[in-house]
Image (cartoon, rainbow, N blue to C red):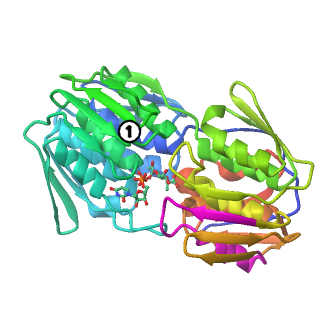
Amino acid sequence: MATIVVEGGTRLEGKVRVSGAKNAALIAISAALLANGPVYLENVPRISDVLVMLSIVHDLGAGTEWESEDCVVIYPPDSPDFETPYEKVKQLRASNILLGPLLAKVGKAHIALPGGCNIGSRPMDLHIKGLGSLGAEISLQQGFIKAKANGLKGARIYLDFPSVGATENIMMAAVVAKGQTIIENAAKEPEIVDLANLLNAMGARVRGAGTDVIKVEGVAALSGVRYAIIPDRIEAGTFMVAAAATGGDVLVENVIPTHLEPVTAKLREANAEVIEQDDTIWVKSNKALRPIDIKTLPYPGFPTDMQSQMMAMLAVTPGTSIIVENVFENRMQVADELKRMGAKIKIQGRTAVIEGIPRLEGAQVRASDLRAGAALIVAGLLADGATEIDNVHYIDRGYENLEQKFRGIGARISRNE
Ligand code: EPZ
């Protein structure tokens, strides 16, 4: 199994360019099934989650091909197959957002339940409730969600929790439902807005994305389109935190600064200098960092996907910092690995109390999920000696050429195949 080795003690300096957003690309590939012509998606990262999602839509009958390094074309079939097998879904939980497009296009969908993962049980009750309101009949049988609908009808839906995936599935079903759909307490993440922009470019009528209330007027059909997805705010945030943690001076390029506001605010509170320009964020931190408290929340709160990376930085920030994880029930496993590197972290339920120490010690560690893997690279940069990270396949799911990008800003990092 491949591992990544990081030598500690380097300040990060220079420029790094962020790829397209994983969590926008995956949804866009699914949404492409709704079109009646080819969908050209630009700024798509070549990461394993994207390759798996492309293989899943290919199995459903769509043609897919890379037009260039970062542009992929999806040729949606007139009548896709409607079943996604478990062995594919267990590789990619996000394939559960095929439910909405398949119900809209075929009137049927058999999606293997993704099951739990390392960060939580990942239920789909809000997806099921929302799609049921649009007229779908949904049952759980033998580990599959079996859904069917003889036409979808607009409805008013309130989400008990602003679930990103549920908002996306409901939106993608509602765009061709009869009449108006209102989604209340909708997720407001930038990836939701990007999906709405893509659907509207295909001829849909979605209003209010990015606010608590999304209104969708159903239309008869959606057409093919060429669309560039947004940059990856979590990849950008990962480099920002690494720059601040190492006392570095890094210009992060290809970002939308407003998408990073919660991360920028917290880094400034921690005494790092963060300069926002049109499509770049410059992070400089030549002063001692200060301890901070973080609560993860749905957007525009502090993103749960940045929590582990922050924990690595706070592990060497003098003083006591507190992190509360409010989105997923089990997303602090990286603390166990950081403690093996000498970190002083106490976990009580969803709360981590972190006593900053001067330096971590390099060690052999293992990633438990995608963002924990990225956090361990940050920790390796902050450690005395070498840190070897196992389970790097998690990192490859969501970060394109991560070692090369880190090497480009001075990190001593390599991959052992
Ligand atoms: C999306 O997951 C992202 N994945 C996650 O990114 C991200 O962490 C998450 O949103 C929150 O921002 C993709 O976009 C592919 P949710 P999703 O539904 O849609 C509960 C990464 O590292 N919930 O907003 O699954 C759920 O248990 C990944 O890039 C229900 O209770 O997130 C969780 O506690 C990790 N019932 C909370 O909502 C439901 O029906 C947030 O889940 C659905 C969700």
Q: Residue furthest left?
A: 150
**Residue 65: image location, x then y, percent:** 40, 35
**Residue 166: image location, x then y, percent:** 33, 48
Does residue 126 appear to the left or right of 43 in the view shown?
left
Q: Quadrant of ligand 1?
A: bottom left
Does residue 197 appear to the left or right of 416 in the view shown?
left
Does residue 313 appear in the picture of this structure? yes
> Residue 308 appears in which quarter of the rendering?
bottom right
Q: Residue at x 60, y 63 (%)?
A: 324
In depth, the one of 174 and 270 nearer the eye is: 270
Q: Residue at x 74, y 46 (%)?
A: 240
Q: How many numbered circles does the render carry? A: 1
**Residue 226: image location, x then y, percent:** 42, 22
Q: What stretch is highlighted in magenta?
A: 321-343
Q: Which residue is drawn at 10% across and 36% down?
A: 151
> Residue 262 appears in which quarter of the rendering?
top right
Q: In this view, does 25 lie above or below 371?
A: above
Please say whether residue 333 is one of the residues in the magenta stretch. yes
Numbered disc 1: secondary structure: helix
Amino acid bearing label 1: Ile
Q: Which residue is tagged 1?
A: 29
Does residue 390 appear in the picture of this structure? no
Q: Is residue 42 above or below residue 85?
A: above
In depth, the one of 174 and 302 nearer the eye is: 302
